[in-house]
Amino acid sequence: MNVNIREYIKNNFKGASANEIEESISSSIESKEEVVLPGLGVLFEILWQNIENKEKDDILSVLVNHM
């Protein structure tokens, strides 16, 4: 069985509201289950590919400061 995680996640959120996506992200993080990490990674990938360099720098700064 060949599962494309990226497409599965994108299809799962197709038509979702901002509130629904936020709730999913929050509950995934709160669960502390490693099985949700690929899905969060897909969301991060979508974010990263669609933001400006200034926003990327801001995210990198937050990550560096919290590692």
Image: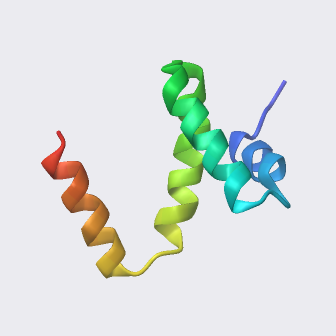
Name the residue: 41% across, 81% down.
Answer: 52
Relative to 44, 7 lies left or right:
right
- Residue positioned 80% across, 30% down in the render: 2
Q: Between residue 21 and residue 48, name the one nearer to us.
A: 21
Coloring basis for residues: rainbow
Question: On the image, which quarter does residue 66 sit in?
Answer: top left
Label count reads 0
* Quadrant occupied by the C terminus: top left
Image position, residue 54 (x, y; %): 30, 80
Q: Is residue 36 above or below residue 19?
A: above
49 horizontally vs 67: left or right: right
**Quadrant holding the N terminus:** top right
Q: Is residue 21 left or right of residue 30?
A: right
Q: Nearer the viewer, residue 30 or 9?
A: 30
- In percent of width and height, residue 20 lies at 73, 50
Q: Image point 33% across, 79% down: which residue?
A: 53
**44 relative to 5 in the view: left or right:** left
Residue 4 percent coordinates (x, y) = 75, 40
State the residue at coordinates (50%, 31%): 29
Q: Is residue 58 above or below residue 25?
A: below
